[in-house]
Image (cartoon, grey):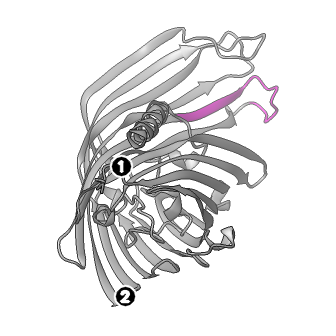
């Protein structure tokens, strides 16, 4: 009875996180989130983030049943009921030539995922994770050709650009052992959320003058599918080489698009914006489509059971095919390289807690799907983290996973912005046999 009460408690706490995740917006401040569907989130939990983002060829890590939605074939190795829920925060410094640095920080619930064995050779998983993030605001100050560059000049014009929102992904997946060495699996996902972008023209010194704003809003929802396979070569009883592949299908999402043009004024006493005074255009496209691209992941890993793991991934996305309501978004194809691993000094240590800890490390490089004035926007970083085991309780095993990602995105060349960021991930992992049968003498 206690076991089922504990299971119900964990489940209800996890469900409480879901509304907060689904409603969260503006969890990034990157100006590069303006393009496409925003910044695309990797389909990874913190234990994989800490290893440079590898995951295509990983499954159980140091004996724990880890949930790995990046490759649904990995579910086939799950032997315990598993829950993983976590938090995410990021800190960013923005650098641009001739402009003082600016900083920003964000926080959110990051994920809640479940997995459970169905048979001795298969398992299912479901959960909610972020898919993309949209959040930025910047201003360009211009004169109209006959004024000066002084802020007090009434001829100045501010062009203000901003965006907010994000997409979430609820998935349901299944993985199975086809042979002792080969596993396959698939996810069916529902991607949903809202993306809003604004562009305003303001006359900061001309009080009483109407300013104008354009708003483009997309309310999105639709199905997407992931699939994958892993092949394990057993080199010795405790040594394994794993090859993996996973992909996301090119599918169409539904979107209801709204294009709104309104006019407003600036309050002369406070400088704040008044509510919209007039709406000049309000146009809706109720049955629009977003064409998602095909994405491929390839990976390899080598593992010495309960000692160490190293691996590498390569991914590519055909984002040049992304279109919204039939309009190609002008993106380029993305590529990423990930390498990393983890080391455990002694998973059976009785005298040193720190010998039980998983020490993780890695690095990643990505050519994103954004290109501006023929300048590729690239991202690179180093990762590190810890897997901190907690005291076991009967058949229950707990671990706290911490991951850090320190990196850069963008460039200061050609008047662009370079972001220096630190992402912090924290999750709680539970492994338990909720439904095991007991025998009594």
Task: Residue 5: say if magenta.
Answer: no
Q: Give 57 or 318, whichever is nearer the viewer.
A: 57
Query: Which residues lie in the magenta part?
Result: 147-163
Nearer to the camera, 184 or 36 = 184
How many marks are shown on the rendered structure? 2
| Left or right: 105 as drawn, with respect to 88 | right
Determine whether 48 is above or below 9 in the image: below
* Place of residue 327 in the rendered image (x, y in percent of width and height, measured from the top left): 30, 44
Is 158 inside the magenta-drawn segment? yes
List the residue tagged with mark 1: 434
Residue that numbered label 2 is attached to: 237
- Under circle 2, the secondary element is loop
> How far across and down, in percent of the image, does residue 404 sit?
63, 60
Image coordinates of residue 237 in percent, x first then y, are 37, 88
Answer whether residue 385 is visible to the viewer in this image.
yes
Residue 325 in view: no
Quarter in which the C terminus is drawn: bottom left
Pointer 2: residues within 10 angstroms few (<14), some, or many (20+)?
few
Of marks 1 and 2, the one in the foreground = 1
């Amino acid at each position: 009875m206690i076991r089922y009460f504990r299971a119900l408690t964990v489940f209800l706490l996890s469900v409480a996180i879901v509304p907060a995740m689904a409603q969260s917006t503006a969890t990034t401040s990157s100006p590069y989130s303006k393009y496409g569907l925003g910044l695309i989130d990797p389909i990874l939990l913190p234990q994989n983030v800490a290893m440079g983002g590898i995951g295509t060829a990983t499954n159980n890590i140091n004996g724990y049943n880890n949930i790995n939605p990046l490759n649904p074939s990995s579910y086939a190795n799950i032997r315990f009921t598993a829950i993983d829920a976590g938090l995410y925060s990021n800190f960013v410094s923005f650098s641009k030539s001739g402009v003082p640095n600016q900083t920003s920080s964000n926080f959110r619930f990051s994920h809640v995922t479940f997995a459970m064995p169905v048979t001795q050779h298969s398992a299912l998983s479901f959960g909610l994770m972020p898919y993309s993030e949209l959040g930025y605001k910047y201003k360009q100050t211009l004169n109209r050709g006959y004024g000066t560059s002084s802020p007090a000049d009434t001829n100045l014009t501010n062009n203000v650009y901003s965006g907010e929102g994000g997409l979430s992904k609820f998935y349901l997946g299944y993985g199975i052992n086809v042979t002792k060495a080969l596993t396959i699996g698939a996810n069916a996902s529902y991607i949903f959320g809202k993306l809003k972008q604004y562009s305003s023209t303001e006359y900061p010194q001309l009080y009483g003058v109407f300013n104008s704003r354009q708003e483009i809003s997309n309310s999105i929802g639709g199905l997407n599918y992931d699939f994958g396979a892993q092949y394990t070569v057993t080199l010795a009883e405790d040594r394994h080489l794993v090859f993996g592949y996973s992909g996301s299908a090119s599918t169409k999402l539904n979107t209801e698009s709204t294009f709104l043009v309104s006019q407003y004024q600036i309050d002369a006493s406070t400088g704040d914006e008044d509510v919209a005074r007039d709406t000049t255009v309000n146009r809706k496209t109720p049955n629009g489509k977003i064409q998602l691209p095909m994405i491929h992941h390839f990976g390899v890993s080598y593992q010495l059971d309960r000692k160490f793991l190293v691996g590498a991934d390569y991914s590519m996305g055909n984002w040049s095919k992304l279109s919204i309501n039939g309009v190609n978004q002008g993106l380029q194809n993305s590529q990423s390289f990930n390498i990393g691993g983890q080391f455990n000094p002694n998973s059976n240590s009785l005298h040193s807690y720190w010998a039980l800890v998983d020490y993780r490390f890695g690095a990643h490089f990505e050519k994103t799907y954004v290109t501006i004035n023929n300048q590729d926007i690239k991202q690179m970083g180093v990762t590190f983290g810890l897997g901190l085991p907690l005291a076991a309780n009967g058949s229950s095993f707990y671990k706290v996973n911490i991951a850090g990602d320190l990196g850069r995105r963008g460039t200061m060349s050609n008047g662009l912005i370079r972001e220096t960021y630190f992402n912090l991930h924290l999750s709680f992992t539970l492994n338990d046999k909720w439904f095991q049968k007991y025998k009594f003498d």
